[in-house]
Amino acid sequence: MSLRVSILTREYPPFIYGGAGVHVGQLVPQLEKLCDLVDVQCMGEPREGATAHAESFPEGANQALRTLGADVSMAAAIPEVDVIHAHTWYAQFAGLVGGRLLDVPTVVTAHSLEPDRPWKAEQLGGGYRVSSWIEKMAYEQADAVIAVSEAMIANIQAAYPSVDRSRIHVVKNGIDPEEFKPDHVRDVVDSLGVDLQHPVVVFVGRITRQKGLVHLVRAARELDPETQLVLLAGAPDTPEIAAEFDEAFAGLEAARPGKVTWVRDMLSREAVRQVLTHATVFACPSIYEPLGIVNLEAMACETAVVASAVGGIPEVVVDGSTGLLVPYDPDKSGDAAYVADFEHTFAARINELTRNPEKARDMGLAGRQRCIDEFSWSAIAAQTVAVYEKAIAAHRAR
């Protein structure tokens, strides 16, 4: 069948900062092979391959309201299509408006859920109530909802019980094993002062409550003396998170002089690939993660993973085969003793692999093979198109 789709997203390459942006950036080229038209509407600076809309109206307003201003502009720019696919709450209002304006079905992808991220109230203030309201409307009114992991199904139904299970479809995130693959060149790691004669633990991600970086920094006090920690982590989301992280990081630097590197600037994906390749262990201490593309990126570079067993991470990291998982119960996040035990166990799992580089190497090889076998973007695009076709049929049947 002829198929024209409009992709609505806040992030689009080359300006991306999170998993949703990576997802869209990888999905679009594959969809172009299967669809007659793939229109992309994004936010921010102008770029090739998409129509960009500035988040500047109303000027000086709360971030959530500026996003809605961009959403209205996006909705007005959608061409004649058969289906609209909106990613994250940032673009879902545009999907709601555009779908009604054009009388076409809408699909939303659950990269994360606002009710599961209450810490965002620190970042958005009253805008968090706005973002939560938008997301609720989008999920309840969408013709189809895509969950990026099996674990997300229960989360969606808990957050939005009126969403019928028949409208939820699992299409997992993926990885391009030709983009993320072992890169044994050393110029980037050498420039960071990393000593490859000793174990290296790497973290890649934002400094947010969700990514749990402060737990890794506290756990790192218990790493073996020669183990190095490299953090590829940008600016914290809020002053409160910054203060908490800065205190923990300063304490770690004092306890492990010369063994901790914090790279504040965003590196290119090529540079990240090289750092991942030379890591003994990739650490993912997230307290909430619908799937976790970053774990796939590390695995594709043949690096073993130590991660918290939350959300969709166990669907990516196979405990004992491609890495090690550490149990974490988000409901106990306020229990200081429980959190301290989690951090202690996380350090112990890392030490288990840094002390046994052969085991870590075998896990890395198994991880890359799993990426190739289970998470190709071509298969994900085909599954996404199948969801579009179901959404179109459901819309016509209304």
Image (spheres, rainbow, N blue to C red):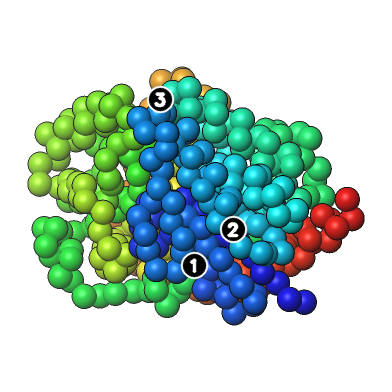
User: Of callouts 1 and 3, which one flags the residue occurring earlier in the amino acid sequence?
Assistant: 1
According to the picture, the residue beneath numbered tag 2 turns out to be: 78
Q: Residues within 10 Å of mark 3 (few under 14, many from 20)?
A: some
Q: Is residue 15 above or below residue 161?
A: below
Pair 2/1: label in front: 2
According to the picture, the residue beneath numbered tag 1 turns out to be: 26
Question: Label 1 sits on what residue type?
Answer: Gln
Q: Quadrant of residue 254?
A: top left
Question: Label 3 sits on what residue type?
Answer: Glu
- Out of 225 and 374, give the one closest to the viewer: 374
Label disc, if present, on residue 122 of the rendered structure: 3
- Mark 3: secondary structure: helix
User: Of callouts 2 and 3, which one flags the residue occurring earlier in the amino acid sequence?
Assistant: 2
User: Of callouts 2 and 1, which one flags the residue occurring earlier in the amino acid sequence?
Assistant: 1
Q: Residue at coordinates 42% horizontally, 77% vertically from top-left?
A: 178
The alpha-carbon separation of the residues under discs 1 and 3 comes to 31 Å
Q: Residue at coordinates 11% horizontally, 62% vertically from top-left?
A: 191
